Image (cartoon, rainbow, N blue to C red):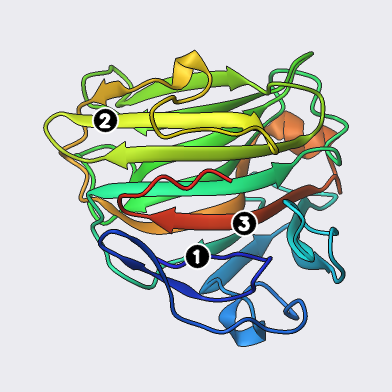
């Protein structure tokens, strides 16, 4: 899989043991998120939504980077509203898949009610159990007095076909780091980390406690082959109340084996 690091603006390719850099850094932020515009993503999809690269100088991105990805839903958005980028090149059917990214929610001032929800990533397999989605792991933000981040993880032992892990955002800073570790197998497993951006984490200690290793029945999925990042799907209440409000994303990194952290 490929790494999208706005800090280096370089393409990266996974080796079996971790990340192997395979490109040189550009001097400035790209004109757009996709490879056609200098970015590291393969494609983008925007319907009733907007995708942009913003910034240009050190510190304007997340984690000290120069730029970041910005997504929002436009006025008049319908049920198919979306604004996301996709990574599809590289190995497919990944049985072990680790990903980490930073998000900034300070622009989502309307994220105050639980029914205002937005899927911000989907990690998709090539095949899925009958009647279930190719999306093997979904991540979404949930509004409320204390907004949360939630994972839906493919698990055929559950009536819905998915297990849910919900983690309140750890503080009101609005800048967070999210990481997960998925193993597809019989049984499979899932771990996660959801912390403030600057909080140190270790592979041995998923954070918070709700993210500790969970056994899941996921052998019916073919392994991860695609990652969609941005507003992949939003609730009706989100569309109605967060028009034009911006979510920022940065420092996406995916690997097979090694812990990523900061």
| Element carrying mark 3 | strand
> Which of marks 3 and 1 precedes in the sequence?
1
Whether 210 is drawn above or below 239: the answer is: above
Residue lying at 28% horizontally and 17% vertically, measured from the top left:
159
**In terms of secondary structure, where does tag 1 sit?**
loop
Instruction: Determine contact: label 2, label 1, CB under 8 Å.
Output: no
Residue at 55%, 71% (x, y): give it: 41
Instruction: Please tell me which of labels 2 and 3 falls first in the chain.
Output: 2
Q: In the image, which disc is placed on residue 3?
A: 1
Horizontal and vertical percent for residue 166? Answer: 53, 19
- Rendered location of residue 122, percent (x, y): 47, 47
Label of residue 189 in the image: 2
Query: Residue 85 or 80: which is nearer the viewer?
Result: 85
Identify the residue at image location x=46%, y=72%: 12
Q: Position of residue 244 (x, y in %)?
A: 86, 49
Q: Is residue 121 toward the left or the right of residue 146 in the image? A: left
Q: Which residue is mark 3?
A: 251
Q: Is residue 211 left or right of residue 31?
A: left
Query: Alpha carbon of mark 1 to alpha carbon of mark 3: how far?
Result: 8 Å
Q: Residues within 10 Å of mark 2 (few under 14, many from 20)?
A: many
């Amino acid at each position: 899989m490929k790494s999208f690091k706005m800090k280096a603006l370089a393409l990266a390719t996974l080796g079996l043991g971790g990340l192997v850099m395979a490109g040189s850094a550009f001097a400035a932020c790209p004109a757009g998120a996709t490879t056609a515009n200098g970015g590291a993503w393969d494609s983008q999809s925007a319907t009733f939504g907007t995708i942009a690269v913003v910034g240009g100088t050190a510190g304007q991105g997340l984690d000290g980077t120069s730029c970041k990805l910005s997504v929002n839903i436009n006025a008049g958005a319908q049920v198919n509203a979306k604004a996301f980028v996709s990574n599809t090149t590289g190995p497919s059917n990944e049985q072990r898949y680790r990903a980490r990214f930073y998000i900034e929610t300070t622009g989502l001032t309307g994220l105050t009610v639980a029914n205002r929800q937005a899927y911000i990533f989907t990690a998709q397999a090539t095949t899925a159990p009958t009647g279930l989605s190719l999306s093997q792991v979904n991540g979404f933000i949930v509004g409320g007095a204390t907004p949360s981040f939630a994972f839906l993880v493919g698990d055929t032992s559950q009536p819905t076909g998915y297990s849910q892990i919900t983690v309140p955002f750890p503080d009101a800073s609005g800048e967070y780091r999210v990481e997960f570790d998925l193993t597809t197998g019989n049984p499979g497993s899932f771990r996660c980390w959801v912390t403030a951006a600057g909080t140190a984490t270790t592979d041995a200690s998923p954070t918070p406690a709700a993210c500790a290793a969970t056994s899941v029945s996921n052998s019916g999925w073919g392994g991860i082959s695609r990652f969609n990042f941005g507003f992949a799907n939003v609730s009706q209440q989100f569309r109605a109340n967060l028009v034009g409000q911006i979510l920022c994303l940065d420092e996406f990194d995916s690997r097979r084996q090694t812990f990523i952290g900061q």
